Each structure stands twice: as structure tokens, then as C-alpha cells.
Image (cartoon, helix red, strand yellow):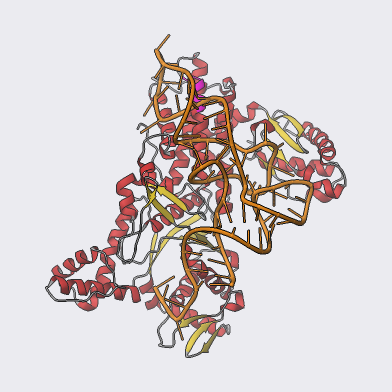
Amino acid sequence: MHKNIQEELTALVRRSLKAGKMDKFAGEEIALDFPTDERFGDFTTNIALKLSKELKSSPRQIALGLAELIEKEIRNSGLNGLIAQVKVEGAGFINFYLNADYFYAQLDRIISAGREALKQDLGKGRKVLVEFVSANPTGSLSVAHARQAAVGDCLANILEFLDFKVQREYYLNDEGNQINILGRSVQLRREELEGKRIEFPENYYQGDYIYDIARHAQKENIGEEQLGDFAAGYILKIIKGELADFKVNFDNWYSQKELAKSGKVERAFEQLREKGLLSERDGALWFNSTAFGDDKDRVIVKSDGSQTYLAPDIAYHQDKFNRGFDWLINLWGPDHHGYINRIRASIQAFGHPAEALSVIIVQLATIFRNGEPVQMSTRRGQYITLREVLDEVGSDAARFFFLMRRTSSHLDFDLEVAKKQSSENPVYYVQYAHARICSILRSVAVQGQGKADLSLLKEKEELNLIKKMLEFSAVLNICLVTRDPYMVTVYLQELSETFHKFYDLHRVLGQAEALTRARLALIEGVKIVLSCGLDLLGVSQPESM
RNA sequence: GCGCCUGUGGCCCAACGGAUAAGGCACCAGCCUCCGGAGCUGGUGAUGCAGGUUCAAUUCCUGCCAGGCGCACCA
């Protein structure tokens, strides 16, 4: 019951508008929000402010009139016991104050149903493909990939929680120029190990791991032609290990090599040609992407007959749709942002709506140590790797930190702060709240006999805690709309803070039995929400620390 | 030159167009005979500049200033 109070209140306002002969505004979008401050009730609407111009009346006057109608509607509907008061405040906001019973009922729902109570069926089973990381198998994953992995995995978790059917995919660049260079790099190192004099080009892979691969190639007697594949396979195993330790699991690894073999690229070309979207100029084959708003047309087959990277990519994205996905989410680094328009043009060329592709540009993370940026240089193979971050701060802190800022913002990641086990470190702040709750629950010998009387929770801090818990669903909604999971980290810190404040002022144990039981139920509810949120982030929920 | 991201107290950073701009660090003053002090309470202190849209702008638009990144028949 009253699973979605926001919707009910929205309908209520709409009915009131009609009752006030303001039918023509009833179709208007009515925002019912959590107020910015607890003093402004439990829900608020700015509809009177919005209508004031058209109605040529002051917002306060409109609000007062509308509030009266709303109160009448409330008396006529079943919401009487739910809404305590409707007040016009500020410039003309209409604020709803709910009865505590509503909050007790909601808390009860969470305790009884657990995590299920927090789910929403917004996705309705829609199939969505989240493609992320997709790093070339030519070296260990960098911190840039790490952030993409954290964001992509967390976003996928949230979408799944909201009833989308999600597949996590890694596009594997397992052939082409980079793999050739990788193979030649290994070949040269192998010759070097055999005592030959070599000259190692600057654009070859410089890292020491190339020697390791060369040694294995020696031992296994790999032919020069197979070296690229061998090395890529070797590195792919390393990457998979790094991702596994980062708790990121892909459902599918999509091989570019197999895509090339499948004939799908040629088929995509044919279809584009039929649509008149290919042209030959200067000895090259171009995709007329300007037809769909791109700045300029793009080459897909170079004048030397070889394909550009765009060619398989067009076929790849078309294949995503052919596999039944109707929403594609791609996470790319900022260096790829110029690539968005041409890929979007390609999906439009095949008749898909532009919105079917969402590209999330994951800004870079700079690693700091004691406030000093740590220098990176991919050229020498000396970039900071995911592995190093994991070894130093662990998966929990790493995931939380990578998710702590808006994805479109640069992120400063201080290794020393992430290692600290103190209040400076938000991961511990949140996990500590969870562990504290578990600790209390542990010290209760007998639990759960008899139903808790939640109406005993009358303290401000107790009600604040319930209200905060109920915001969780709205937070996930924002994550969906903004396609950015970072709000979850902000929310979990707020919920933890609300809990710590409650804990400081009120004792759970040693109260009158009925009150203790009610407070145990309360913190059990907090535990469910905290645990759910941490789980969506991919961060563990320790029972003790 | 074009495009993208970012400018909020000494430092880091929040606010799906709303009400008195939220937290944290640092600094100052407090709180454990009591469920975990990895916690809590109080204090000082902020929206780069100039216009515009709006009942309302940190948020949207334009211009400028500053920082980061990208602009291939590379991947």
C-alpha cells in the first residue's frame, strides 16, 4: 500500500486543479519533490509558482486557493489518515506533511520484504547492453580503465535493480595494428633475450611485461606469425584477473577478430551502400555521416584498401541491435568524445533512433599520493595500473573512490586517503555504520519474537532515519535519469551520517523492551538499505571491522 | 581555430531550475561509569567575471577569464 506516495500526491494535485476549474493545467507536469530542508514538510510542489504568470495572480494566492481544494480532495479520498497537513509556505510552495503512520508502514515494508521493497520496475525488462572498459589487450588496465570499470559495473547493477535486463560487454580488440605491434614487440624482446642486438622502436610496447611474454613464447616455441595472438591472449588473462579482483564480471567478451571473420562488416557496408550512404573519393570509401549531423564524412576503407577502426565498429553496433538490445550504453574515455557523432550517425543510418545510444564519457582520474600527483607515462609503460591501486587500497576503497565524483568530472584519487581508516575516508564511514548496526544486532540474544510496535519511534532522529531510508528509491531514479551512479555514494554517506547521529543520542539496547524492539527494527531497516546501496556499488558490507 | 569537461570558504567537494548554498579536511571549543570514539555537538568561512531568460539561477543561454582533455585515410 502506498508504494509510491509521490504518484498519489501528484494525482491528488491534478484532481484539485480540475476541481478548481484549472483543467487546462492538469496535464502540465506536476513536480512533487523531497523538500530541500526538513522544515518544509515531507513533499513539496511548486505548481502554484509555475502557474502564477498564466493565472495573473500572485503565487501565494494561487497556492492558498489550491491548498484548500487539495484539503477537500484529501477528505474525499482515502488519504485522510496519511496526510497530516497541507501548508502554504515560502514564496508559494505547497508542502505536504505526512502522518508518522505512513513512515512506520514504509519501514515495516522494508523490514518484511528486505531488499525487494527497494526495487522498482522502471525498466520493465527492457534489454540494455552496457559496453565498457574494452581496453586493447596490449597491457595491464590503467586507472582510466579502472574508473570506467567501476562506473560501468555499478550502473549496470543499478539498471538491473530497476528491472532492466542488462548485459555487460567487453569489446575485445584482438586483431589489427596494435596486435601486430604487440607481436613484433615480443619478437624483438625474444631476439634480445637470445643475445641478438636489437633496436627497439619507440612506438612499440615498452613495459617489462613484454619480456615475460617473450620468455613464455620462447618456452612454448611460438612461431613469429602467432606471436601477436599469443601475447594478446596472455595479456587478456592478466586483464581478466585484474577485473575479477576488482569484482567486475563481464557477461560477454566480443571478439573483433570473430566479427571480421563473420562477414558482418561487409554486410553492413552493403546495407549502407543500398541506402546510398557510402561514397568513393580520393581512392577511399567514405560513410556519409554528415547526413546524420556529423561534422564531416568518415573514411571506412582507406586508399590502401585496409579498413579504419570505424568499419568494424559500425558493424559491431549494428550487431548489438541485431542481438535484441534496444538501448546501448557505451562508456568511453574523454579522448573518444569526437567519436560519438559518427557512431550515432551509423546507428541512425540503420534506422535506429539517436537516443537508442547513450555514450557516457568517463573523465580521467588523477592519482595523488600525499597531495602530489603521481606522474604517468604510457610511452614507457609506466602508467599507474588498476593492479597497483588494488594492491595498495583494496577493491572496496578503490570502487567507492572511483564512484565518488560525477562521472563527467575529473577525479582526484589520493591513495593515502583511501588507505586511511578514519573519518577522512568515506568508505569506512559508511562501512562503519553498517558494522555498528551489526554489532548491536549481534549483542541481542533473542530477537524477533513478537512484532515490533514501530509507532514507539517518536524521536526526531528516528523519523529522520526512516525518511532518509525512503529517499533511496529516488536516488536510484536520479541515477537512471542522469546515467550516473555516483549519487549513491553521496546518499550512503548521508544515510550513515543520519544513523551516527541517531546512535549518538539514543540507545537501542537497555530500553523498555518494546522500545528496544522497535529500535532494533529501525536499525535493521537501515542495515538493509545500507547493505543494498553498498552492494550496488560493488563494495562489501562488513559485519565487523 | 573547433569541440568536450571543470571553476563553490585555506584545501576537497554537494545541491534532478526552488526556500537560510549541504558535507568533509584543516583550525578553535566541547562529548565516552553507557549498544564499537573509525563516532557525535558547537564555532569561523564560499557560488571566476559580465550580461540574459525566469515568479525563482550554483544550476539554463551568450560573451569573457582560468584549468584539463580531444580534434587522423591512428586505435
Quadrant in which the N terminus of chain A is drawn? top right
Give the x, y percent position of residue B11.
48, 44
* Number of marks in the rendered image: 0
Q: Is residue A236 above or below residue A310?
A: above
Residue at x-position 43% and y-position 22%: A447
Residue at x-position 52% and y-position 40%: A491
Residue A515 located left or right of residue A209: right
Q: Quadrant of residue A379?
A: bottom left
Quadrant in which the C terminus of chain A is drawn? top left
Front-most of residues A360 and A452: A360
Give the x, y percent position of residue A249.
37, 54
Q: Quadrant of residue B37?
A: top left
Is residue A176 in sight in this rendering?
Answer: no
Give the x, y percent position of residue B52.
76, 56
Residue B37 located left or right of residue A123: left
Give the x, y percent position of residue A296.
56, 78
Front-most of residues A419 and A224: A419
Q: Is residue A155 above or below residue A524?
A: below
Front-most of residues A384 and A275: A384
Q: Is residue A505 magenta?
A: yes
Front-most of residues A346 and A360: A360
Q: Is residue A29 magenta?
A: no
Q: Main secondary structure of the magenta part?
A: helix
Is residue A29 in sight in this rendering?
Answer: yes
Q: Is residue B73 above or below residue A249?
A: below
Q: Which residues are magenta?
A: A501-508
